[in-house]
Image (tube, helix red, strand yellow):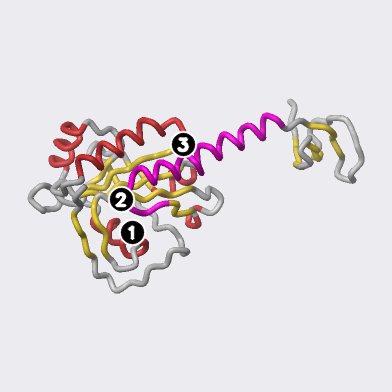
Amino acid sequence: MKMSLITLFTGLTMTLFAQVPNWNQYTCEGDQYSMYTEFSKGKAVVLHFSSLWSAGSILGAQDAESLWQNMMLENVKVFGFIHQDQDFNVADCDDLNQWESAQGTSYPSFVNIENVLNEYVSKYTLSGATTLPWFLLFFPNDENLENSTLAYSGHDINALNHILYDQWVQGAVIAEQTIVSKKIVRILDMLGRETAFKANTMQVYVYSDGSTKKIFSTVE
């Protein structure tokens, strides 16, 4: 698959472990999205950067749409960022609308994204250059949004899918199974004495796997 090369000379040093850059973008329909908003909802986020003149854009769009259709129920959000049109100009809404109609894509996509692309290339490439289409996958830290994790950066959608399934989808299944299999075996008061359930009182629940949790149950 041929890809376009985009080089951005920003004079910045890439820091993989500093905070994930946030962005706020509007679709051509006026819908607003934000990276950190999706993280706060506990969603994994896939960013798909492309230029419409790139030979790989059609296949990249189809791959991104397939991922979106397969993963939208798995707390995964896919976003498209269109850099340039077929004539190497900055893409506008007419370009995006024609592209979405031709490729049948339904995931949210944006134009006028050069600042976002510059920031992510500066941060997540060693040379200040990347080829398009370019995929990035992030796993959320909903308690500390800026410390969310970059799980994949590259051009192989199959590799991204493997990581997404193995680490995100399967991890959620295991966590759900663990929650379902846990049973309450004892209830303790705050002095560690075994007691019965009491409403409107802080108590410690002891589960069958040995874990504990403080619970304050309100009953009206």
Tell me if 57 is positioned left or right of 123 in this view.
left
Distance between mark 1 and mark 3 Cα atoms: 23 Å
Q: Residue at x 39, y 46 (%)?
A: 159
Residue 62 position within the rendered picture, expressed as x and y whole percent measured from the top left: 26, 36
Q: Which residue is mark 2?
A: 155
- Sooner in the amino-acid sequence: mark 2 or mark 1: 1
Question: Do callouts 2 and 1 mark residues in contact (Cβ within 8 Å)?
Answer: no
Q: Which residue is mark 1?
A: 120
Residue 99 position within the rendered picture, expressed as x and y whole percent measured from the top left: 17, 37
Question: Picture quarter containing residue 26?
Answer: top left
Q: Residue at x 50, y 37 (%)?
A: 169
At label 1, the amino acid type is Tyr
What secondary structure is marked by label 3? Answer: loop
Q: Is residue 98 magenta?
A: no
What secondary structure is marked by label 2? Answer: loop
Q: Main secondary structure of the magenta part?
A: helix
Label 2: few (<14), some or many (≥20) within 10 Å?
A: many
Image quarter where the C terminus lies is: top right
